[in-house]
Image: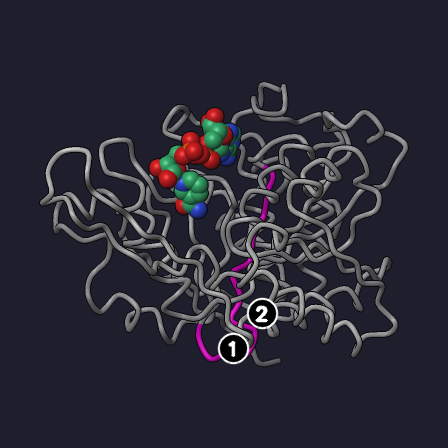
Amino acid sequence: MTTRTFHIAAIPADGVGTEVLEAGRTLLDALAADSGGEFAFEWTDYPWGTDYYHRTGQMMPDDGLDQLRDVDAIYFGAVGAPEVPDHVTLWGLRLAICQGFDQWANVRPVTFHPGVTSPLRTIDDTSLDWVVVRENSEGEYSGLGGRNLAGRGPGNEVAVQSSLFTETGCERIVRFAFDLARTRQRKVVTSVTKSNAQQHGMVLWDDVFARVAADYPDVEANSCLVDAMAARFVLHPEDLSVVVASNLHADVLSDLGSALAGSLGLATSANLNPERRTPSMFEPVHGSAPDIAGKGIANPIGAIGSAGLMLSHFGLHDAATRVRDAIDATTAAGVLPADLGGDATSKQITEAVLDHLETAR
Ligand SMILES: NC(=O)c1ccc[n+]([C@@H]2O[C@H](COP(=O)([O-])OP(=O)(O)OC[C@H]3O[C@@H](n4cnc5c(N)ncnc54)[C@H](O)[C@@H]3O)[C@@H](O)[C@H]2O)c1
């Protein structure tokens, strides 16, 4: 058998990013070692992030994207540190990679694990499972705008931050959502906008959604305003299957979803270039969590689950299923980190997931 070797760029970056990425790598390497030569991972470490910024004045080098261009995937931790403004760290690294590689579809599953108490009280007898599909290349995070007129003196500066909605950008993410819905048991796509108040870009989104929906008669399509959707996440989550929204709205809604599932530390994410022209990036949704960094208590499940999404992206579906099952077996056994009300360390959780990988073989 020829071993399929996947070259992965690891960018742990800042804070708990380094801790949780280590956990995911341990899992991936264990799966490769156990694959009987079916697949292997070759890692390259990139020490980019805030420490690198302090040394060089940049979050990553000028040729950073060129260094990453030929890898099979990027495994990312989290970026951000209290002493550097967040827009500098985010735009200098994570958003630079997402935009630079046109990773236009951000898939953020909301997964409820056994043994984890959700603030949604129906969790014990209702099966909940939905995916937030985030437009990841334009919208409110297109970076268009600027600050000016500071020269008029204190209190007179202005800032313009424009949202960009292109028909192409809307259409590709909406089609992606419908295609994803076709793979799920409940074939429903809900489009989220605020087109009552934002009458240009988001009405274009609505028009595109209606046009694309007509091509998918087998998928139920409906629309919801973002404020109503926030309430629906809490009150009627059983209605949801695929939720497609703009960059900002899906960013906020996916954090809400993960909190409803128990904690932000659980949330997984894939930043995809679906055409595979450039490498896709897999990362936990959470940030660098400076308040708990270095304590060894960060929840590694979001990072481990994101490694599972990477395995699916590589077509290693059995391995991906083993990761999901091992996570569920770990939480069901009550091995929970502090953010889920337990006292297990990051290392203990990683070991428990590894043990369950063994037993699931
Ligand atoms: N993708 C990213 O790289 C990303 C995403 C969000 C925020 N950030 C950055 O992270 C920094 C901190 O931002 P924040 O505090 O708003 O968000 P955060 O996600 O870092 O933390 C929010 C809360 O969730 C907790 N938390 C996060 N991850 C956890 C984990 N794995 N286990 C247990 N608890 C966890 C934290 O302790 C904190 O209480 C900022 O610099 C921000 O810009 C980066």
Q: Position of residue 212 (x, y in %)?
A: 72, 75
**Residue 276: numbered disc:** 1
Seen in the picture, residue 248 relative to 63 is either above or below; the reply is: above
Q: Position of residue 317 (x, y in %)?
A: 70, 65
Q: Is residue 321 left or right of residue 44?
A: right
Tell me what residue is drawn at x 66 percent, y 72 percent.
208
Tell me what residue is drawn at x 77 percent, y 34 percent.
114
Q: Position of residue 2 (x, y in %)?
A: 57, 81
Q: Which residue is mark 2?
A: 170
**Which residue type carries mark 2?**
Cys
Q: Is residue 15 left or right of residue 6?
A: left
- Where on the picture, by quarter, is residue 62? bottom left
Q: Is residue 45 left or right of residue 247?
A: left
Q: CA distance from mark 1 to mark 2?
A: 19 Å
Q: Secondary structure at mark 1?
A: loop
Q: Position of residue 45 (x, y in %)?
A: 32, 57
Please tell me whether residue 268 belongs to the stretch shown in magenta. Answer: yes
**Which residue type carries mark 1?**
Arg
Quadrant holding the N terminus:
bottom right
Q: Is residue 62 visible?
A: yes
**Badge 2 density bin: few <14, some 14–19, many ≥20, Cα 10 Å:** many
In front of the other: 297 or 242: 242
Q: Secondary structure at mark 2?
A: helix
Q: Where ligand 1 lies, by image quadrant?
A: top left
The magenta segment is 266-278
Q: Is residue 297 visible?
A: no
In front of the other: 78 or 172: 172
